[in-house]
Amino acid sequence: MGDEWIDGGGLIRVAADHRYELTPRSLELWRYRGLLPRPQRQPKGRAVWLYPPGTDRQLLRLLYWRERARTLDAVRVALWVEGFPIKLDSVRQALGSLVDTASSTFQRELGSPKDRSATIEVLAKKLASMRGRAPYPRVVRMRSDERARAYGYMLALASGDQIELERRKEDAQLLERMIGLRSGHNDGLAHLSPLNTKIGRLLPHLSAEYIRAIVASAGEEEYELVRLLVRTLLLWLPMLLPLMRSSTGSKGIAIFDAAQELFRDAPAEVHEVITIGMLVSLQVKAPEPGAIRDLLAGMSLGTIDAEMLTLIPTETRNEAFKRMRPDQRVHLKDELARHSTRSH
């Protein structure tokens, strides 16, 4: 699959083979939205329009995410993270729209500044009491009053109200705990991020306008580095977490178990949130453009996957390889083939 040119009828048959219903109209719509490559007219013989190799793999992932995402923008970002040919401008626009929508929603819910403190208290308690529909997964165990205070600080951040932020500044640590950046007095999942930069210390300085500006201004190389990191995190973390869990203390087990649950089948929206978070973290680190360029020169999906595979115990590597989807294995197989050729 994925090595030959294919026509529209062939794509529809591929979808049917995997129990998806697909119509020519849907293909046309997704081409127009930039979620699938455009077919190309073949130079010889009768007029035949064929999609480039790999389109069938991209279609299956598109159909997968379409059933699990609330918006096509979330599908778009998930496909881009996975390495499919999605235009960067459309990804940038999708992430910016998410920031704008979230900011507008919070502002609308928070109401006028004169009632803000009381409104935050009511909303924070409501959010803290949610479980299945909670806006943030329960990564760590917390008392309900602590979780409410953490949400209160998050809402104060969204409001941009400096008075509320100052009044709730002691609750910043609770927010860090809630999102997994802190476990007690220590770091939680923060050290797993390749761009870890004590992002919790930056919380009071973040705003929707600041994040939106980063999404809009980050360059192609910054986006490519973040894409590779997010893809690596979401693909390999579910396989590595059980190994890391065995070496952690009893207090950290709950964090790793919750992370395993979240990343085992991460929603498309998680791809958006993590991408934005890493863009912000990269901006804060402010590496030299040449440093990013040098880093990218030695990175590819194949080389990354080959290196990550070495972290899996030898006796379970074959099982880890089998658990990868065909679209994930293709890069690793190509790299292993190149390595075998070089060794001979």
Image (tube, rainbow, N blue to C red):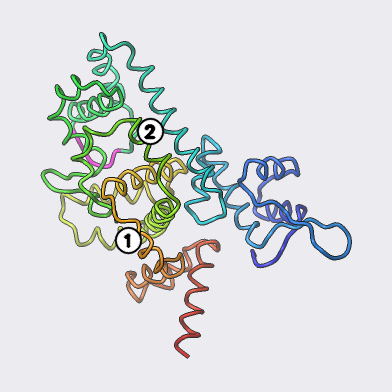
Q: Earlier in the sequence, mark 2 or mark 1?
A: 2
* Residue at image point 35% right, 48% down: 261
Q: Quadrant of residue 297?
A: bottom left
Q: Which residue is mark 1?
A: 291
> Residue 155: x, y in percent?
28, 25
Q: What separation in Å lies between label 2 and label 1 (alpha carbons)? A: 42 Å
* Residue placed most toward the observer, 19 or 238: 238
Query: Overall secondary structure of the magenta stretch?
Result: loop
Q: Residue furthest right?
A: 46
* Residue at image point 49% right, 47% down: 78
Residue 326 belongs to the span the image colors magenta: no
Q: Which residue is mark 2?
A: 132
In the displayed structure image, the side of residue 292 where residue 35 appears, left or right: right
Q: Which mark is residue 250?
A: none
Q: Are marks 2 and 1 in contact (CB under 8 Å)?
A: no
Q: Quadrant of the N terminus?
A: bottom right
Under mark 1, the amino acid is Ala
> Residue 194: x, y in percent?
29, 56
Under mark 2, the amino acid is Gly
* Residue placed most toward the observer, 101 or 305: 101
In the displayed structure image, the side of residue 212 where residue 256 appears, left or right: left
* Residue at image point 74% right, 56% down: 40
Give the SS element for disc 2: loop
* Placement of 132 over or under 140, stated as above or below: above
Answer few, some or many: residues within 10 Å of disc 2's Cα (few below 14, many 20 plus, some between 14 and 19). Answer: few
In the displayed structure image, the side of residue 243 where residue 75 appears, left or right: right
Q: Residue furthest top?
A: 114
Range covered by the magenta-colored residues: 138-142
Mark 2 or 1: the one toward you: 1
> Residue 23: x, y in percent?
74, 43
Q: Quadrant of residue 109?
A: top left
